[in-house]
Amino acid sequence: MIESFREIWLNNFFENDVKHKKITASIRGSLFRKLQIIDDATCDLDLRSPPGNHFEKLGGVLKGKHSIRVNQQWRLIFMWNETLGKAREIYLDNHDYR
């Protein structure tokens, strides 16, 4: 379940289908599906399927956060509370955090 978004435009995209310059036509459908997967998830196993999500725990400066892949360039980064089954502070990021 999604508890919060870090960026209001991403929340508006997910809840109200509002377009934004960061959301190109090439990622629009995939991004929405990945947000639906996060919103429907109740445990981390839900986020691991399908394997194409590439769900992972992040380290370094992003320790404590998780990500799933939107495409080769973009990731959704968020904090995951396994006990509550909730994601918070979700944001879309270039894959340059490694």
Image (cartoon, grey):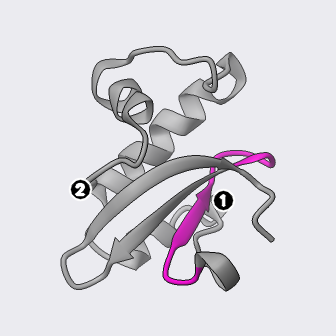
Magenta segment range?
A: 63-74
Name which quarter of the figure residue 15 lies in.
top left
Q: Taking 98 as reference, is 18 left or right?
A: left
Image location (x, y in percent) of residue 40: 28, 55
Q: Earlier in the sequence, mark 2 or mark 1?
A: 2
Number of residues whose C-alpha sits closer than 10 Å to that of mark 1, classed few (under 14), some (14–19) or many (20 or more): few
Image x and y of residue 89, in percent: 38, 57
Left or right: residue 86 compared with residue 94: left
Question: Which residue is at a point 42% across and 28% down the rendered structure image?
Answer: 9
Q: What element carries label 1?
A: helix
Question: Which residue is denoted by mark 2 in the rendering?
Answer: 3
For the C terminus, give its image quadrant: bottom right
Residue in the image at 37% along x and 18% along y: 17
Q: Residue at x 77, y 55 (%)?
A: 95
Any mark on residue 52, and which?
1
The one of 65 and 14 positioned closer to us in this rendering: 65
The relative height of residue 69 versus residue 65 in the rendered view (above or below) is above
What secondary structure is found at the residue carrying circle 2?
loop
Amino acid carrying label 2: it is Glu
Query: Could you say which disc has been placed on residue 27 in the image?
Result: none
Q: Residues within 10 Å of mark 2 (few under 14, many from 20)?
A: few
Q: Does the magenta stretch include residue 6?
A: no
